[in-house]
Structure formats: C-alpha cells, structure tokens
Amino acid sequence: MIDKKKYNCSDCGFEWSSPQKEYDNCPDCGSENIILVSDEKAEINSARGLGGRGYGRGRGAGAPRVCKCTQCGYESPKTPGIPCRNEKCPKCGGILCGSD
C-alpha cells in the first residue's frame, strides 16, 4: 500500500494529495505555509480510534471564492489557479488577498 499524503495551504486554502512527493511549497500560490493534513495510514488509524492528525484549522475545503483588496475593500471572483496576491486592485492598485 502506498501512503497518500494530503496537504493544505494555510494562505490560499488549496488542498492536494501526493502518493510519493513531499512538498515544501503550495503548488497553487507558492506559499511555504502548508500543513500535512493527513495521510492514508493516519486516516485508517483514526477510524480505528488509534489517533491521527486533525483536519487543518477548521477553515473548510478549497480555495477562497473571492479576492479582496487590502486597502479599499474592492472584491472580485477568484480565478482558479491564480493566487489572489498576484492580482492588483483595479481601483487603487492595492494587493488583493483571498477572502470568503
């Protein structure tokens, strides 16, 4: 059986899994602020009452749905695969960040 590790990015919310590769950065936004959410063995052990890792910080699954300006509050829908912080606000030129 191959252990399948599941990861979550604390910055953009992107979730992914990998059967072999270890990750140090989020493949979506490049952040180093990632969490190993679980692996297949931990899920099996947890289901058996043997302990295991939790599921992140209660944020929920998936990336943010909206990008919001940190300066003026402008909001726009998030474009999948493009981190909000790579976008600039069309109103004031500020940096956008993920928001729900």
Image: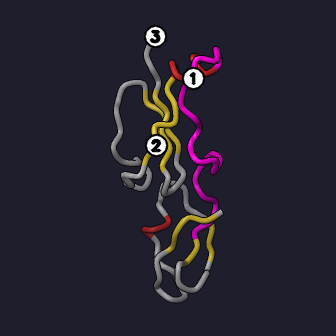
Q: Position of residue 18 (x, y in %)?
A: 43, 30
* Numbered tag placed on residue 1 in the rendering: 3
Q: In the rendered image of this protein, does residue 6 appear above or below residue 12?
A: above
Q: Residue at image x 58%, y 35%? A: 54
* Numbered tag placed on residue 51 in the rendering: 1
Circle 3 or circle 1, nearest the eye: 1
Magenta-drawn stretch contains 50: yes
Q: Counting other residues with Cα less than 10 Å from the Cα at mark 3, is it few (<14), some (14-19), or many (20 or more)? A: few
Q: Residue at image x 55%, y 78%? A: 69
Cβ–Cβ under 8 Å for marks 3 and 1? no
Q: Position of residue 26 (x, y in %)?
A: 41, 48
Residue sticking out furthest to the bottom = 92
Q: Residue at image x 51%, y 56%? A: 12
Q: Amino acid at mark 2?
A: Ile
Query: Label 3's element?
Result: loop
Q: Counting other residues with Cα less than 10 Å from the Cα at mark 2, is it few (<14), some (14-19), or many (20 or more)? A: some
Q: Amino acid at mark 3?
A: Met
17 vs 32, nearest the viewer: 32
* Numbered tag placed on residue 35 in the rendering: 2
Q: CA distance from mark 1 to mark 2?
A: 18 Å
Residue sticking out furthest to the front = 50
Query: Label 2's element?
Result: strand
Q: Amino acid at mark 1?
A: Gly
Q: Residue at image x 58%, y 63%? A: 78
Q: CA distance from mark 2 to mark 3?
A: 23 Å
11 vs 82, nearest the viewer: 11
Please report whichever mark, 1 or 2, sits nearer to the chain's N-terminal start.
2
Please give the range of residues in magenta: 47-67
Query: Label 1's element?
Result: loop
- The chief SS type of the magenta part is loop
